[in-house]
Image (cartoon, rainbow, N blue to C red):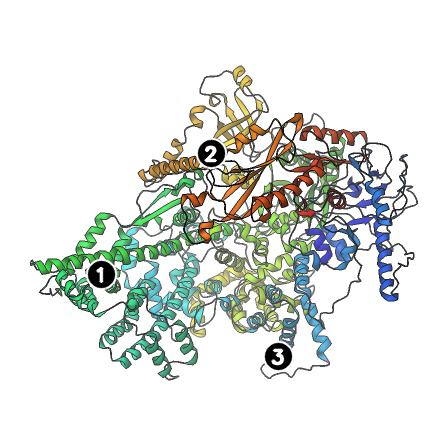
Amino acid sequence: ARAALTRMADASRFVDVAAEETSSEEEEGLRSTDNDVGGEKTGSEGGKGNVLADPPKEGVGEDVVVKEEKKGSEDGNRALEKGTKFVDDLDEEEEEEEEDDSDEEEEDGDDEPKKRKRDEEELELDEDDYALLAEQGVVVQRQKSGKLKRIRKKTGDDDGNEQHNAPEGLTAEEALKHKLFGGYEGIEDDIAEEPQEEDADVGIDVDEEEDEMADFIVDEVDEDGEPVRRKKTKKKKVVSTTGVVSNHALREAQEIFGDVTGLLEEYEQMKEARAAEEAPVQEENEPGEDREQSKAIEIAAKHFDPEILKESYLTRKDETIRRVDAPERMQMQEIPQLQYVDYDQEARWILTNFFSSNAPQRLAKTILEQGRKEEVRNGRLFMRAEPRTPKMIQEWRDSEQEQIALLAAIRDVLYFLREDNLEVPTIAMYRKDYCGELLNYRAEDVPSLVSHDEAARSDGNLVAGQVKLESRLLRRWDILWAVETWDVKWRFLQHRCETLVKTYNVALSAARNLGDEMKIQGIQVCLDRIAESSTSEQLNDLDAKFQLLQPHQDAMTEAIEAMSLDELDTSQRSRLLSRLRKPSSGMGRLGRKKSYHEKLMEGIGMSAEELSDNIMSNYKKYAPVDPRSPASEMLVELVEEQSNRDMVMREVIRLAAEDIAAEPELRKLVRDMYRSSASISTIPTIDGARVVDPFHPKFAHIKRLRSKPLALFYGTSDFLAINAAEEDGLIKLSMGMPEAQKSQLSSQLQDLFLSEGVNAAAQSWNDVRRGIIYVALNEIILPFLEQELRVHLLSEARECVKHSCRESIWERVSSAPYRPKAVNASDPDEETISEVRVMSCVCGPGQPPTTFVMLDAAGQLVDILMCGTFVGRPPLKRPEPSTPTKVRDDIERLAKFIAKHSPHILAFSASSFNYASIKDELIQEAINQVVDDMPGSLPVETGMIEVVWCEPSVAKLWALSALSTRELREQPQNVREGVALARYMKDPAAVVAALAGSHGKEVLSLSQHPLQDYLSKEERMGAMSESIITAVNQIGVDVNLAVLNEWLSWSLQFVSGLGPRKAKATLNAIIKSGGAVQARREIMDLSNMGKVVFSNCAGSLRIVEHANVIGENDFEPIDGTRIHPEDYELVRELAKSALGQGILEEELMIDKLFNDPAVLHKVDADILAAEMENQMQVKKHANFMDVILEIQHPYRDMRRQWQKPTTAQIFNYLAGESASFLRRGRLVQATVKFVYRDFVVVILDESGIPGFIDHFDVSDQNLGYNEVRDLLQPGASLTARIVDILPQGKSLDDIGPSRLAFVQLCTRGSVLQNNAAYEQELEARDLFYSSAKTEQEVAAERAQRQRAAEIAKQKDKTFSRLVNHNMFQNRDVKEVDLEFQGHGSQGDFLFTPVSGKFDRILLTLFFPSRHGKRRGSHHLIREGEKESVRTGKGQSMASKLQLGKPLTVIGIDGTPIGTYEDLDEICGRCIDPLVRNMLAITGHPKFREGYEEGLEKVVKSAREAKPNVVPYLLAVSYRHPGAYYLCYLVSRNRPRREYIFPLPDGYKFRDRIFNNVDHMLNWWKSNCFKK
């Protein structure tokens, strides 16, 4: 399997399979199969087998004769199919003989090789290899004997080619090479013709491959072109139970098979093998089966890669999660454990955050205020007809009773979450009575209500405002999910509070030990305020204050060690020691606070705490005390050196500002004002102005903002776009308060801080105080608040993107399956067909072919039909006048296929505009044939077959996933995509759940938001999982069907309480017990499921009777409903009330109740619910109503009814990724197709979408039809601007062959040049967007142009270098080229300076070209350090002009070719051998003179004269002076050119170094088909 994976993934290796000899064929050949991923099949479908024959003697050179197989083709001799490689059996046989000889030499010590005959070995592929090849669409003929014979190649051919014998005196290897490649007389050489391979290197180390790859490699060649033989070794089996399995092998196995479920079988084998040796002693509290599983996990951990075990959920942690009786997702949440939780306090905190102005969960707040929830009255469901008005919302907020009820609901939900371990779906479905308004409906989910007119016409059966039960849809629980989110935030906040309390207590103890009263008081204040803090910002402010008061590290360490275990346990002690921080620059003063600092700070006259009190009191409670002497005089007294006085004063101001800036009251004051008045502005950078146009899908609307208030960013993802554009260097962001507000804030603080004294001393110290306020605000607080606000806005924007992801996936999972209405259905319940037969169609260009897939009722593959002639055509191409015979045959095959399976619907994948004709013409014709010729084959229920467009994105993802590879390994990708498309029609939620629940998480590849890539995978997956969980728990999972059909089983992990580990364990337990369950309670018993997990998942697990699953076994209908087992007692009481006490046995009463639910009208639901609540001591009124509804309609599908896609949706499907780039006003390139009298039809080059241009939009001039026709000829390219997409008046209800175009374009010059108009449209949509450039932008562009001009001027300037050498001239290289073009010989050279550079010179080496002219190849020489730098004298201009050492010569290809001490050494050791090597190429027999185009014609002519040869030649490259190239032709396509770079020590070719030309050519002949 490893070898097969290597050959499949590495496109530079191909598998060669020899065809078996048959008596009916006179010729022998090799059949090749392309094993490249996604490559075309060869062999029976057109690939040619070939054999090598001896070349003829005549001609320019020796030939490689390729004899083509004479079957399966009518084209005669043709070029080889792509992907073919041939094995030279002569080389293999010789290799085998040499291997045997080497073995004998090792054993006998004989110098002479002892040759012996070897039987021909047969190539045999493993079963896994056959499976992998079949998976890629490669058909390989299997031999009856299990092996394939190798075929010896003939020494002659039947076409009369002469046999070319090798000269005498050659070794066997030389003779073989001579026979294959011949001499050097011509350009045609003997090379085994192979097709072109593609570059591929997927990182698989060839050295690590197993030796079975030797079967596919003829020989290897060393760097000199000499063959290297290697011995074949037998493959050894590795027993995993006795040795460690290779991690590399396991990883590759997982990539091949997509799943490692086989590991479970390995574990079972391990347990059985060791059962006799190790009889585990069972503990009393651990079941034997769990004990064995734990033992198997321990054994597996020793043998397998931990990463593989982690992906397969087979680690010890996974085993613990499976066994613990708690929901799996709750166990996976990393939530800190609190010492004490006050749910009342938490509920108040959550409610406050719900109604805060900037809450991320703003949607939850809106739903709460609207107040639309179900209410049960008189056994009926009612709902508010309209949401609350603003006045009603205010009354509701002011109502103490309403708010107390809301707080109680939040508290109860928190208790259910954390104490009862119930997940949100369980709470929403089975704890309704405790949730109150937390179960309010979103506006989109509100069901229809009975109107007054309907109630009047119902004769009292209906009441106005009553919910229409049939209109109830799947609904979202936004408020409950928000409560869970806020609960997590609360717990992290409280955990931080607990940590800070421990840290502050330690600091308080340390301060007491030091006897520092000021720190004791300050720390105690911080400690008291922790309990009052309810936001992370408040805790940040407290912590900033604490850092100023924190004692030094030694005192803190002593205090920690002195605490008892009761005060601080071991783990807390270690955590505090690890978190112990040294004070920062402002908080610990970094040892720079001196005595004169303290005296000067005393002169300020007011402490930070007093200023804080003034801010809290909002008046000048404390006034500063002015010193007698001014600040300058005190500074002179304290600091003797005059030069240090300014620095000391700046330090004092900074220290005082840090004290003030750490006060929580000041930070809160500034934060409130900052967030209320701050704004954001953006301007584009130079790159941004070029890249971000008005049509950019992500950044167009935030390119140039002018003071946009922060409030407008809440509820949008704009700040995420701004942050992303800033990180990409496209815009510059500025954030801050307006200067007016900043001045107002500064004045407010100065009024509370400055002295009212008028003397010189008071004014002097007021100047210092103003400086302190300025530094505290502008240098400390405001920059900190800006970073804090950035984080806050970024979190808000990410929440908006996650909301979009949730909504996008909800649209998919909440959609109902396709269920057509039955014709003439007598029973209303039978109006829709439950068992729908779905056929799907996935189109292809012919290879792969268009594929039709048929599924059965369970979604399993039944039949496949491939129509290779259904290739479609471009939308504007006219159909053929008559249908070709082959197409007609495929239409008849399709008609029979449809008649055979009688599908209700044919799902057509909307993957390309080119395939629209297949749907509208070919498929429709086949259906018409069924209607006309085989009407009895039409579906009985509907009498017709509907063909609908379907979105292909989900199906494509599933087809490429490991899930499809494992399930449908033998099928090609088109079949797998067709299966997924049909399944998506049958159950969208199940297919999406499979993509979300698999290891690959392919659902993340769905396009949901333009900025989705800026979220982490975990964030997006969490958002989408929320929607999937919500939908799956309301839809339910049929357990027995999930056991039988793997594609349905992935939904199980999204059931409340379960997860991938518990779901898999549950399925395995059911399969192990027989593959089916008859009751919900059996699931709990079989899988050892705990009560908590069972309580979560039971209601969403359906146990439904199926003939192919349970048969005649007993089945309880109550287990097939949403009724929870804890509510089964309610059903019994309902049955007794409806049917009477003691009339029937309990089970019979329940069966009768479900068979005849009409008897429930006898029951007074309100009275019975009240009695049951008193009896059970739990609230069950709302659940009681749900029980009644479930009895009447068990598990009624509440998904949104399936709808045909609209025209706009179909257009987006067909456009694919291009749809996101089609924006009104964008410039596009297009090609003219047709010119009609009123409009011109074009095709967009980028997407292939058809568009049209009205005649009056062609030009600003009023052109007539003839002028337009002359101007725009078919095939002409043009630039146009998109005017509209799907324009009104030119669109049809359905996209069909009559549709001419989808995009309206304009080519008028005035429109093409008017980008400003679309910038102005952005201004119209956003009042804070500006299309005008700012002065800063204009200045930046001007500076950029000036810098570019200076760089260009400096670059063109040539300096006269101080280099003393006879071959160096201070001249411009262009002048040298012109002067030396007309005379001289090859090998002349000259050194010249480089323009604008002091650290390099240029070597120009001349060689003759055509017509006696010469060209120069330029080699850059990099200089080392100058002499002045090495001696430490510095660099003057004169020293810069000197020549540095050492000197590194750079080759033509840009890589260094040698380092030398001086120019003389370069001349002797580099230039001379380089010239000799260049002369060796020009003197080679294969060298030809001429331009590339002319030489290519020579090669083509040689190939045309002898089609079965591979001609090649050597030539000089005029495009890259100094380089040569090898030109050869292996097929009838354009010849290949590969460059050769002469070096002093040889030649560089394909990143290898060769000593001479012959070695290089020999190596190339063996590897010419590898890129």
* Nearest-to-viewer mark from 2 and 1: 1
**534 w.r.t. 1480: above or below:** below
Measured Cα–Cα span from mark 2 to mark 3: 68 Å
- Mark 3 crowdedness (10 Å alpha carbons): few <14, some 14-19, many ≥20: few
Task: Identify the mark nearer the N-term, 2 or 3.
Answer: 3
Task: Check disc 3 and report the residue beneath it.
Answer: 287
Q: Residue 295 appears at what percent x and percent y?
A: 64, 76
Q: Is the residue under label 1 in contact with that under label 3 (CB below 8 Å)?
A: no
**Range of residues picked out in magenta:** 276-282
Indicate the secondary structure of the residue bearing disc 1.
Answer: helix
**1180 w.r.t. 216: above or below:** below
Front residue (pair 833, 956): 956
Front residue (pair 152, 115): 115
Task: Check disc 2 and report the residue beneath it.
Answer: 1226
Q: Which residue shows up at 50% across the image and 47% down it?
A: 1444
- Mark 1 crowdedness (10 Å alpha carbons): few <14, some 14-19, many ≥20: few
Task: Check disc 1 and report the residue beneath it.
Answer: 644
Q: Is the residue under label 1 in contact with that under label 2 (CB below 8 Å)?
A: no
Front residue (pair 1569, 1153): 1569
